[in-house]
Amino acid sequence: MLTRESQVEDIMALPGLIAWCIRHGVSPFSCYGAFPGTLGRLLEIKGVQDVDGFIQAMNTELPKHRPEQP
């Protein structure tokens, strides 16, 4: 489960995360690679009005992008 305190560097490998963020107007990258900080801080810097709503949507939508377990 993603929270405001989730480190962007730690969540970049989640299937579909990068594409989902970009489709919703937020790039999780900086000039040096993954944004070096928390998801909450990234979303604040990017001007997301409803940070908690954005994270809630990520938690709802991203599991749909994960591969099925055999």
Image (spheres, helix red, strand yellow):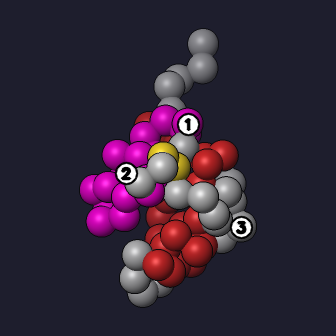
Distance, label 3 to label 1, CA atoms, is 17 Å
Q: Residue 34 carries which label?
A: none
Q: Earlier in the sequence, mark 3 or mark 2?
A: 3
- Residue sitting nearer the eye, 9 or 59: 9
Q: Give the range drawn in magenta.
A: 13-30
As drawn, the residue found furthest toward the front would be 32
Which residue is labeled 2 in the image?
20
Residue type pointed to by label 2 = Trp
Mark seen at residue 5: 3
* Residue 31, quarter of the rendered image: bottom left
Residue at the spot 65% in from the left edge and 70% down from the top edge = 4
Report x, y in % for residue 57.
48, 64
Circle 1: residue type? Ala
Q: Which amino acid does label 3 sit on?
A: Glu
Single out the mark in the foreground, 2 or 1: 1
Q: Compared with residue 54, is residue 61 higher up or lower down, i.e. above or below?
A: above
SS assignment at label 2? helix
Picture coordinates of residue 18, whole percent (x, y): 41, 46
Q: Is residue 70 visible?
A: yes
Q: Name the residue under label 1.
A: 13
